[in-house]
Amino acid sequence: MTTVLIVLGCLVGLFVLISIIGRFLSGDFAAHTSVELPHPPQDVWNAIADFRRHPMGGGMTRGVEIEETESDAPGPMWVEDIGSSNTRIKTERSEEPSTLIRTLEDLVVPMTARWKYSLQATEVGTQLTIESATKVNLGTWHAPIFRVLIKLTNGVQRGVDHYVARLGKTLQADAATT
């Protein structure tokens, strides 16, 4: 019984410690990646624009639901179901096929993100650059823990890198079938 209480006490202490550390960590996270893809800019643009196939939530996304947008909106708005949360994504700027800016708002955790996609034609195909700025505000009990997890796992950079890897695989598969 004493061992169980000690283990429980340690777990509670660890949880409290992580929560305290998370409160003092910056809530601002950034990521940047740039890759040359052997595909024309329009093909890369079309793949990025296909948010059902390439959701911002990546492999965590269980479903996508399109939302109504204003008539002057530069692009679509949708909600991604990522299991324990939902995120609303808005297209803020769209200049086909060179620049796309999307913002993400988590509907559970006080988190926002802004992704800027830049496409530049090269001799080989397209230079794709993605810049991500993510902010996790305090406000819920799990926000400090989320900050610690993002920091420890380099979560924002990993998310951008995984997105680009999936995009590359899709473009390669699509090119093989045409």
Image: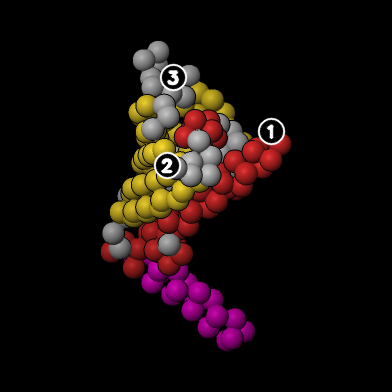
Q: Nearer the viewer, residue 83 or 153?
A: 153
Check the image and name the residue furthest to the top: 71
Q: Is residue 167 above or below residue 90?
A: below
Magenta stretch containing residue 76, yes or no?
Answer: no
Secondary structure of the magenta portion, mostly?
A: helix
In the rendered view, tell whether residue 66 sits above or below residue 26.
above
- Residue 33: image location, x then y, percent: 41, 52
Decide which of tag 2 and tag 1 comes sooner along the chain.
2
Q: Is residue 10 shown above or below 49?
A: below
Residue visible at 37% across and 54% down? 31
- Residue plotted at (61% across, 47% down): 169
Mark 3, residue position: 69
Q: Which residue is mark 1?
A: 178
Of 46 and 15, nearer the camera is 46
Q: Amino acid at mark 2?
A: Thr
Q: Residues within 10 Å of mark 1 (few under 14, many from 20)?
A: few
**Side of 101 relative to 52 (left or right):** left
Point out the tag, 3 or 2, that comes first from the N-terminus: 3
Which residue is drawn at the image coordinates 59% and 41% (left, top)? 171
Image location (x, y in percent) of residue 172:
62, 44
In the drawing, what numbered circle is on residue 122? 2
> In the image, which residues are magenta?
1-20
User: Which of the pair 122/66 is nearer the observer?
Assistant: 122
